[in-house]
C-alpha cells in the first residue's frame, strides 16, 4: 500500500464519522459509553485479554478525539 492509499483510508475514516456525529467530542462520548458497557459483558463471552485490548484501543481513540 502506497502513501496515497494510506491517506485515502484516513480521509475515508474521518468522513465516515463526520456524517454520524456532530463533533469529535460527541464521538468520544459515545465511545466512552461503550467502554463502560464492556464492564457489563457476561463472563466467559470474551477473554479478559480481548476486552482489555478493546478498552485500550477505544481509550486511545477517545483521547485523540478530545485533543481536537
Image (cartoon, grey):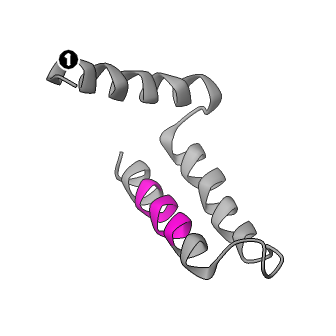
Residue 9 coordinates in the image, percent (x, y):
36, 25
Residue 24 coordinates in the image, percent (x, y):
49, 41
Residue sitting at x 70%, y 72% = 46
Residue sitting at x 54%, y 78% = 49
The span picked out in magenta is 53-61
- Mark 1 lies on a secondary structure that is helix
Q: Is residue 25 magenta?
A: no
Quarter of the image that includes the N terminus: top left
Q: Is residue 28 above or below residue 48?
A: above
Q: Is residue 4 above or below residue 34?
A: above
Residue sitting at x 78%, y 72% = 45
Residue labelled with disc 1: 4
Q: Is residue 13 above or below residue 57?
A: above
Q: In which quarter of the image is residue 10?
A: top left
Q: Which of 42 and 60 is in front in this view?
A: 42
Q: How many labels does the image show?
A: 1
Residue 12 coordinates in the image, percent (x, y):
43, 22
Residue 64 coordinates in the image, percent (x, y):
37, 53
Left or right: 23 as drawn, with respect to 60:
right
Quarter of the image that includes the C terminus: top left
Left or right: 45 as drawn, with respect to 15:
right
Amino acid at each position: 500500500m502506497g502513501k496515497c492509499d494510506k491517506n485515502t483510508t484516513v480521509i475515508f475514516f474521518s468522513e465516515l464519522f463526520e456524517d454520524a456525529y456532530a463533533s469529535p467530542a460527541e464521538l468520544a462520548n459515545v465511545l466512552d459509553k461503550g467502554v463502560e458497557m464492556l464492564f457489563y459483558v457476561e463472563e466467559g463471552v470474551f477473554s479478559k485479554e480481548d476486552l482489555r485490548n478493546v478498552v485500550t484501543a477505544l481509550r486511545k481513540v477517545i483521547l485523540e478525539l478530545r485533543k481536537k
